Image (tube, grey):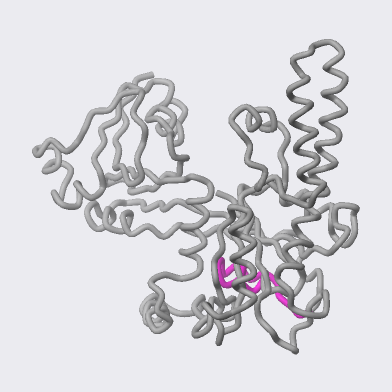
Amino acid sequence: MKLGMVGLPNVGKSTLFNALTNAGAESANYPFCTIEPNVGIVSVPDSRLDALREMYSPEKFTPATLEFVDIAGLVKGASKGEGLGNKFLADIREVDAIVHVVRCFEDDNIVHVEGNINPARDIETIDLELIFADIELIERRIDRTKKLIKGDKKYQTELEFLEKLKEHLEAGHSARSFGFDEEEAEIIKSTPLLSAKPVIYAANLSDEDFRNNIDTSAHYKTVCDIAQQENAAVLPICAELEAEIADMDEEDKKMFLSELGLEVSGLDRIIKEGYALLGLISFLTAGQPEVRAWTIRKGTKAPQAAGKIHTDFERGFIRAEVVAFDDLMECGSMSAAKDKGLVRSEGKEYVMQDGDVVLFRFNV
């Protein structure tokens, strides 16, 4: 999974990126501090994997990973090449989902590119640049479809849909909020729309508001209202606090989070939202050589899950020996789970479940 972190200059984006990834991206109080996208790869925390490591004492331990891309700050006119616009839009195309960092804190010492704090305006600024870029794509697609209609009338339905989508975008609405039916989703699949990408709005609050006033913060409420209209996720976060947490050892981190009334860090919360937005789950493989987590989409069948490990596993798939993680933990070992009949032999039509512990049988 690759998450692109975006936001206007000086909203705390690079500070949050550094805190989440410890990647050391430059952060400063002036626009366009980030030019080339910084990339940080982090392990996905998974207590189930930790428990399997205790059980097997493996030679190798491999959690799933998540890639954060800190993308250059953006200004009005990016879709027309203003600022670092073209680079920004190209980088956005490469990510699976967007973490849009929105400034919800007041601080006279940190300049805002627009002069004051207004989350609705800031969100609209970036949304409109993505929408403008999408309109150009749709216009080109419409032109191609009109030419195809001359030789094949079946493209008339496609043209009507594309024109309806263009009207929606021109009204200032993102493709996310269009509500594609199955046929429309198939038509548009080959046209990667930027404003259709799933979004997590990271509402960057002040230390004081994050600790005490989340529910009463007018800026945060604005972000929540917008997210609800767009079917997007929203996450209250404080980049300043995350930066403090990043330098702590695990014990101090847990104590600090407990004082804030939180069970997990901002990184964990963003990962959870990212998995939910993209419809991702993890299955696990376990043994003395290696304990590992594998990320797949919900609805993936066993042979395709096996293919994540190696193409030969999918090509020569015979069956999957599957036990639910909770059952395995309750039994204490794979052999005990087998004795109780909790290890199932599943075929090609089995749909993988989150937390399945699997051994694939194959022959090539």
Q: Position of residue 300 (x, y in %)?
A: 43, 33
Which quadrant is home to the C terminus?
top left
Nearer the observer, 254 or 137? 137
Which residue occupies 70% across, 61% down? 6
Nearer the observer, 201 or 40? 201
Per the image, is 17 magenta? yes
Which residue occupies 57% across, 72% down? 19
User: Is the residue 355 above or below the residue 18 in the image?
Assistant: above
Q: Is residue 167 left or right of residue 192?
A: right
Which quadrant of the view contains residue 322?
top left
Nearer the observer, 185 or 276? 185
What is the magenta range?
A: 14-29
Which residue occupies 33% across, 54% down? 49
Q: Position of residue 246 (x, y in %)?
A: 51, 75
Q: Position of residue 194 (x, y in %)?
A: 72, 47
Q: Is residue 105 left or right of residue 288?
A: right
